[in-house]
Amino acid sequence: MKSLVIAEKPSVGRDIARVLGCSKGGNGFLEGKDYIVTWALGHLVELSDPESYGEQWKAWKMETLPMLPEKLEIQVIKKTGKQYQTVKTQMYRKDVGEIIIATDAGREGELVARWIIKKAGVKKPMKRLWISSVTDKAILQGFSHLKDAREYQKLYEAAVARAEADWLVGLNATRALTVRHNAQLSCGRVQTPTLAMIAKREAQIKGFQPKPYYGLKVKGNGLAWHWKSKENSATAFSKEQIQRALEHVSNSAGTVEEVKKKKQKSYAPQLYDLTSLQQDANRMFGFSAKQTLDYMQRLYERHKVVTYPRTDSRYLTQDIVDTLPERIKACRGGSYSSICGKLLKSPIKGNKSFVDDKKVSDHHAIIPTEQGIRLNELEYGERKIYELVVSRFLAVLLPPCEYQQTEVTVLCQGERLVIKGKVMEQPGWQEIRQIQEDAGILPEDGMDEDAQNAPTAGEVQGNLPDFAKGQKILFTDGKITEGKTKPPVPFTEATLLAAMENPIKYMDSSDKELKKTLGEAGGLGTVATRADIIEKLFHSFMIEKKGQYIHLTSKGRQVLELAPQGLTSPELTARWEQQLADIAKGKAKKKDFEAEIRAYTVDIVKDIAASSKTYRHDNLTGKKCPECGKLMLEVNHKNGKMLVCQDRECGYRKTLSRITNARCPQCHKKMELVGEGDGQRFTCVCGYREKLSAFEKRKKESGGGVSKKDVSQYMNKIRKEAKEPINNAFADAFAKLKL
């Protein structure tokens, strides 16, 4: 008898097939002596749409809500139905004695395979392959340690509970809002609190009152000294206080009160999980969260040079330690080859700073695999992300950075003046940072995790002169420094991801236990879904970008006003995720969670139906929809502008402009492509204008930049996107439901 292996994607399936010696080609599967390997295409089966339950839910009407089927059914996804039939056929083969689930190791991966098996109705023994990377070695080790699939039954139940809860709450709330206000509106337990966090940040910025503050810098012994208050602050809000201090110390002698010398160590930042990687990639390269995830998926599946990307852990398990030297060898081909050589000269050890089995749940932190690659085989984005993973991996293996900090305090006429000196003794992991600085890839705002050793006020890089307690210092020129407190900065994708991961300060509740629960639950969404949530908010025009910053649109603000209050807070997710974790651990029952969700669904539909609030389109244009004749809306999407029909059932849209990768020859910023047909032209904020035809000719003559083929592919992409309906309320709310 043979074993049937079900992978989540074709690329992973082919890798497994090659390792298992399955070379006989089939239509959607590969076969060998002992194994048959087939694959899904992500989800092949999903929860059934509301219309499938009967006539009552085919039309969107408030009187038919809430939709609460006695039992939620599953259906085959039509566009991938052919592959489902292939998998089903293999499962029913008489020579197949068991099924090995080899989908991604996690809650969602479990759901992918189990729903296929359930829909097919097959009853055969099942085993589970649980691996975090798809290298040959990992696959072989995984197959030598297969587990009984029954060990993951509770994980499957938690996955079903999450999917059903999102269906019940998300579809009912979205349909109720849409029908009640006759506009394409949606809300959900993750996307709506995310909107609320953006709104709260914007309110903080709008209501911020700048406050002036003052400091004092004085020359003494050829060095610049900084004033400090009794509370150890280098600034004060009272100018009079600083003015008095200046009068006291100018042309006065002070006495060295204290000389502190202390050896310090700084340790490398933790290994990457997906969210922290997405944050750094956004700060360093401007990649969106979705782009980073896509690059990581290709590095994991196609190139096999990194471990499983959708992880929320920043630690490794003990069994990985023995593989570290091989992983270092695989990284020797890039910018960090000298670091790799240095590390390989000594035994590689793991320590509690990055190895802790207790802090790894489904998957360990993202690190390179044992498989090397020529960097020129990677696309630009893939290479940047790969090198980020490599740099963080090598950093934790290097020794800490060691330096000596000297702080001298002088008392002068009752005022304290301080100077600090810092001398590097052992760069340690900071060698990685130096390589990044030389390559010019550190965040422009200096807000990366590695910035823990940046100079502070009054700090001198290097040795200070020797000072002795009781020594007299004459102070001469003094200067009052001024500044103003700054408002919070609007969210970027990087900082929004951080807020979604740790949204506690955006909770209205003062319940400490609830905040603790939210922290333990991992915040809003998961590492695997946050990027999709942000993309969904852009796609539904509830948020927009101005430069690198994210802002609410009028639609986003109104949705927050119209949505049930419970759906605007992170607290709902805190409760859900904790309950789902308990279900996965066997501490709670799925049926109890489902009963609670159904009751909640009834309440939110009642709230929406009873609301007296109204929704208005404040972005109406004078242009009529060519399909239905109604006035169209002008909306800002993530990369430009478009016209969208206001009728949610029509769904017509037309691209007006789009930010491109073509650079302005004058200021080198990205240009915008506007117009249609032969009238298409590039425009830039600096005022530069150029027809598309002239641009193509110029690039062809120069032999550089964007080729005609690139432009053609880009235009085809725009035309394809323009045909995709975005106001189809059911498709938007259900087909890609990530609430």
Image (cartoon, rainbow, N blue to C red):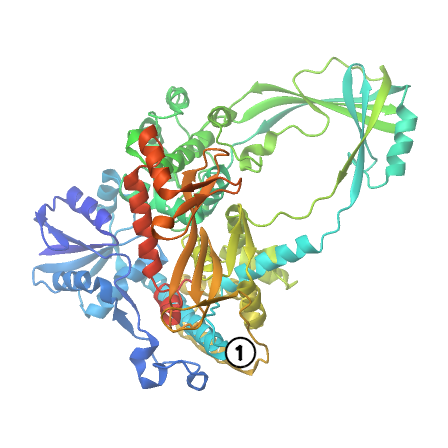
**Is there any visible trace of residue 413 in the rendered image?**
no
**Is there any visible trace of residue 334 in the rendered image?**
yes
Asked if residue 620 is positioned above or below residue 11 in the image, the reply reads below
Q: Which residue is drawn at 40% across and 23% down?
A: 343
Task: Decide which of 699, 590 is in the foreground and name it.
Answer: 699
Q: Is mark 1 on a helix, strand or loop?
A: helix
Q: Residue furthest top?
A: 466
Asked if residue 469 is positioned above or below residue 708 in the image, the reply reads above
Question: Residue 79 appears in which quarter of the rendering?
Answer: bottom left
Task: Decide which of 177, 697 is in the foreground and name it.
Answer: 697
Q: Quadrant of the N terminus?
A: bottom left
Q: Residues within 10 Å of mark 1 (few under 14, many from 20)?
A: many
Residue 607 located left or right of residue 580: right
Q: Which residue is drawn at 58% across and 62% down?
A: 514
The picture places residue 75, in percent across and down from the top left corner, at 26, 71
Mark 1 lies on residue: 608
Q: Which residue is drawn at 67% across and 15% down?
A: 463
Task: Decide which of 580, 565 is in the foreground and name it.
Answer: 565
Question: Residue 292 appears in which quarter of the rendering?
Answer: top left
Asked if residue 238 is positioned above or below residue 335 in the image, the reply reads below
Asked if residue 380 is positioned above or below residue 659 in the image, the reply reads above
- Give the number of callouts: 1
The picture places residue 247, in percent across and down from the top left corner, at 92, 27
The picture places residue 464, in percent across and down from the top left corner, at 71, 16
Q: Quadrant of the C terminus?
A: bottom left
The picture places residue 94, in percent across and down from the top left corner, at 7, 63
Name which residue type carries label 1: Ile
Task: Decide which of 146, 222 is in the foreground and name it.
Answer: 222
Residue 687 located left or right of residue 129: right
